[in-house]
Image (cartoon, rainbow, N blue to C red):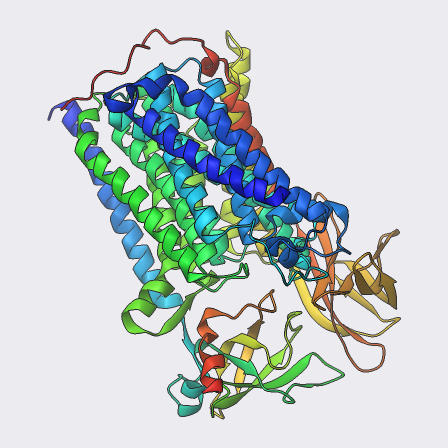
Amino acid sequence: MHPTRRKRMIIVLFILAGAGLALGLVLVGLGENVNMFYPPEDVVSGKAPVETNIRAGGMVLEGSWQRDGQTLNNEFVLTDRVDAQFPVRYSGILPDLFREGQGVIVEGQLNARGTFEAERVLAKHDENYMPPELAGMGEAAQE
Amino acid sequence: MIIELGHFAMVLTLGLAVLTALFGISAGRGPFAAGLRSVPSLVVGQLVFTALAFATLAHAFLEDDFSVRYVAENSNTLLPEIYKFTAVWGGHEGSFLLWALIMTVWMCAVTLRGGHLPERFRAQVLGVMGLMNVGFVAFLLFTSNPFERLVPFTPSDGSDLNPLLQDFGMIIHPPMLYVGYVGFSVAFAFAIAALLSGRLDAAWARWSRPWTNAAWGFLTLGIALGSWWAYYELGWGGWWFWDPVENASFMPWLIGTALVHSLAATEKRGVFKSWTLLLAIAAFSLSLLGGFIVRSGVLTSVHAFAVDPERGAFILIFLMIVVGGSLLLYAVRAWQLAGRATFEPSSRDFFLLINNVLFTVALVVVLAGTLAPIVYEAITGGKISVGKPYFDMIFVPLMLLLAAALAVSPPLNWKRTGFARIRARLGIATASAVVISLAAFLFIESEVPWQSLAALALAIWVVAGHVQDLVLRVRGSRLPGLAYWGMFAAHLGFAVSLTGVALTVALTEERDLVMSPGQVVEHGGWQVTFEGMSSVRGPNYIAERGTFRVAQNGANLMLTPEKRRYSSGGSIMTEAAIDPGLFRDLYISLGDPLDGESRAVRLHFKPFVRWIWFGALLMTLGGFVAVLDRRYRRVKSPAVQAVPEPAS
């Protein structure tokens, strides 16, 4: 084969290999590591899988946040402000902007009794900011 | 009145940018031929007026002019002077003004430092950049105007700058990042000008290289500063979160790194020409995509910019025009640019190809992970998130492969390299890397994942190989030029960062616990004593301060993390206390108050975490040093002539 053409073949093969590698990695990676997000109604209705890593979110129900004064254990209730709500348990330090009435996202697993065992709790850094996943919940409440 | 002057100055800038684009891109042909000579003055005019607009906004901040909406939203009479100035780019509108200002500075730099370029070619480069600036300034004026007034309902005080941004790291992080993002517009403009003129030779690549290196250096610095800031300011002690906004800055960096390397091959060997152009287009497009992700709020992120769908739509349309237009031009013209050179797998050319494939695959992985939630929601309406496990799983092996390829590369020649040469110039390094790695493995007592061990060994191999190469070159006939030293520093930086990541991930000890005053705990070999809480008053906040005594082998130090409540808005901020060290950081932050005097406390012991940023600084330094190489300062290259007529 002509050297120029051979070089081009090498490049083309490399690009194809690269593209295939990238595609494969992405598909396998996404297949194994995607967290689905579930709003409160899905958690309550049983649509959210049990004992699987998922994300859920909602507003922290006023008056629901209970903290054990001796340990880092917290319990609170997340609601969509319509009718669905579920309890969350979390052991650790909550973010600065965690407070009642705020929208938060929790990552972890739902147990068989319907309590969400959170491994991470995310609240946003800006008081006026609403996580996109929770957008619409505030409006739904006003209807 | 002054702020209206600023507004007017930006309108003038828009006009000048339109003229720059028209005169520059037509490059002395067609109906606008007469404008060619005026391009440099139009560029200077844009810089002057944008700087003026920036100054008027800064003035409004320093004078507490809360009749300006943007000032009222991002400042406060109690804000310290320095933060009043930096608040100019603390919000969306002002940060875009900074972006536009930096764009005009780059254009001016090309005008001043590009004296050796053929006049028409330079005019085309400036014209393309002018066209981009038309988009930026129009975006500023029509969707994000910082000069808007709040009359007649002028508030008596402003609502304050987000406390997270009242910090040194935040003062310099966005400007550096923007200098990098916008700097890729120079490489982009060079690529478009090359496509328009049909000229892409070694001289073209030599002209592009210093600009690309400089932009890449600034972007590296900007990303490192952002990571460092997140580490000490967000209070969780992490240094990278794979957050969409972080990814937004990382994607242009990945492709920019590929571009820096492929430009080397294009200049020296005339290979990968059209691929280099594609990378230049991609690097700038990804910078714009980053802007879209940050500004449009389509993705959940820790970065809470005010979100406005109109802005997102504007950037998306602009992005589609830029990407679509340049790819169309590319499709029409790039096939004429085929190179003739050949090379074998044992060549530097081939290893640069490996570099490019790996960085491009890394980009695809990050891009897919970042955009997957948007795509998924558009198709199914459901919501997903792609987190750290996905990125870690794929990124770690890619970086290990990259490190392995880098370790082998120092002795390689262009075109082909004999095995004897590789053995002669890499043998000692390889042997010593094996010995040092084994010694290091024995030294590490705790259980460490194989990825970290592999990364550590590869990093040592990279350093050893580069050092042996350096020694051989210095002993040889002549001292290598600055471009070589830049490459050396950047590759060393990669190895240092890799070591930092590998060891931090493997050896970090972190613990959340409850501590009451007087209690002592053992953490990372240190004795941490909680002495108690006190109250402190800052300029615009009140803080609860915890006092911790930390002791080890007679060394004794005090760490005082704080929980601050800012007087305006009442937002609460965790201010971590860190004892930095070359080999380890001690990091303490406060959680909530619990029963009695006890307190939730977060303790981190992070070995080698500084190496991550130190390595990035070395990479930055490498990028800048390479820019100063003598080759790029030659007055006129013999190949310079008028730009040939485009082939029809």
Residue B271: image location, x then y, percent: 27, 25
Q: Quadrant of residue B204?
A: top left
Asked if residue B525 is positioned above or below residue B471 in the image, the reply reads below
Q: Is residue B615 visible?
A: no
Residue B509: image location, x then y, percent: 66, 61
Q: How many marks?
A: 0
Q: Is residue B192 visible?
A: yes
Question: Viewer-proximal residue, B345 or B376?
Answer: B376
Question: Viewer-proximal residue, B134 or B440?
Answer: B134
Residue B335: image location, x then y, percent: 17, 30
Asked if residue B260 is positioned above or below residue B173 in the image, the reply reads above
Residue positioned 52% across, 70% down in the render:
A130
Quarter of the N terminus of chain B within the rendering: top right
Residue positioned 48% across, 86% down in the render:
A141
Question: Which residue is situated farthest in the left direction here?
Answer: A1
Residue positioned 37% across, 86% down in the render:
A47
Judge from the rendering whether residue B238 lies leftward or rightward of residue B250; answer left or right: right
Question: Viewer-proximal residue, B395 or B332?
Answer: B332
Residue positioned 85% across, 61% down in the render:
B537
Q: Quadrant of residue A12?
A: top left
Quarter of the C terminus of chain B within the rendering: top left
Question: Viewer-proximal residue, B114 or B534?
Answer: B114
Residue B76: image location, x then y, percent: 72, 57
Judge from the rendering whether residue B647 lies leftward or rightward of residue A77; answer left or right: left
Asked if residue B635 is positioned above or below residue B216 in the image, the reply reads above
